[in-house]
Amino acid sequence: MKTNLCMFLSQTHNLSKTVFLSLLLAITLASAGCSDKSGNDKAKLAKNADDKDQKAPIPVEVIVPIRGDIQQTYRTITTLEAENDAQVIARSTGLVQQILVEEGDVVTKGQKLAQLDVEQLLLELAQIEATLNKLKNEMDRQQKLFTRKLGSSDALEKAQFEYQSQKAQHQLSQLKLNYASIKAPIGGIITERSIKQGNLIRDNDVLFKIVDLDSLIAVLYLPEKELSNVKKAQKVLLDIDAMNGKLIVGEIDRIRPSVDTNTGTFRVVAKVGNSDHFLKSGMFGKVEVVFDTHLNSLLLPQETVITQDNRSHVFVVEDGKALQKPIELGFRHHGRVEVLKGLDDLAKVISTGQQILKHQTKVEIVGNDATSISPAVAPAVAKKND
């Protein structure tokens, strides 16, 4: 009986172990099934989300290139100068009796600007003239005596010398009288008046300053690496601050053939047209020297171009997709670039939203189907690449 009880307990223990293992296996399988199901559900949801994202096109705006002229230039700054200007200097002493011009007046060469008091000069001139007449009479008398052999040659020569000396004094006095009328040495505009009526002026005092506005020049200092690119008669474009964006066209007149060892630059002088005399000496502005011009080039706004690792590309729309197009650029300036290769005239170039695009991304054109660049910005001017 004891033996039978032990066998029963052993069987019961084995049975419990088997049941436990069976239950554990069932739980494991159930958990694995749930896990697989959950994973499959998540994968399906992610796939559906990706599909939904891929199907939703990205809104973009497009433009088409334009044809226009574009130039290669070098930019720098300049201050306008007058090549012809003059300070009017007093060449006689006296009181200012009358001032005939003011600052801003346009004068011609030889025009009277002011008048000095000449009362003393007239008296001096009259005194010299009287002495001159006396000496002339004496010289004539000595000449007659010498002709009749009644006078000596020494007396004649002395009379001639005294007359010639007094004649020179008379001419000098007459010149001082003329100098009392202050006249313009050049034509131009009065930019400074340094005297007032009643002032006593002396020799070499500065009275006026005259600037010839028709002789305005722009003086440029360019780096020596540009020496081979600059030539006479090349155009320059000046953007003077006072002109509110209106460009002034000038022309290179002189090029200094030597380089300043301290600055590494050379001097260039450009003539500036100023027929309406709006430009003034001393005005400051930006200037561009035009080195080269490409006619009828394909132009794009610079913001449409993406440059990475010295390679440039744009995105164009074809069949509802954004396609990345490598392009080769030429001149660039004022927000415009020249496209040498990679595009045609009818390309729909993405102008907004291109920074987030990838090749073959689905896109939707919003706004105009193809908005041209405004013709007002062409022809463009290109900055020379350093």
Image (spheres, grey):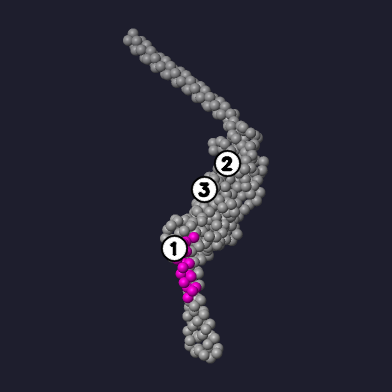
Does the magenta-highlighted stretch encompass residue 186?
no
Element carrying mark 1? strand
Amino acid tagged 1: Gly
Does the residue at mark 3 contact the one at mark 1 (Cβ under 8 Å)? no
Amino acid tagged 3: Asp
Amino acid tagged 2: Thr
- Sort mark 2 into few (<14), some (14-19) or many (20+) by Cα contacts within 10 Å: many
Q: Main secondary structure of the magenta part?
A: helix
Q: Kindly report the distance in space between the C-alpha atoms of the residues bearing marks 2 and 1.
A: 72 Å
Please tell me whether residue 168 is drawn above or below residue 265 in the rendered image: below
| Residue on which disc 2 sits | 304
Q: Which mark is residue 241?
A: 3
- Residue at 57% of width from left, 49% of height from top? 247
Q: Looking at the image, can residue 379 be seen? A: yes
Of marks 2 and 1, the one in the foreground: 1
Does the magenta-highlighted stretch encompass residue 116?
yes
Q: Which mark is residue 94?
A: 1
Residue 236 falls in image quadrant: bottom right
- Sort mark 1 into few (<14), some (14-19) or many (20+) by Cα contacts within 10 Å: many
N-term-proximal mark, 2 vs 1:
1
- Residue at 66% of width from left, 49% of height from top? 296
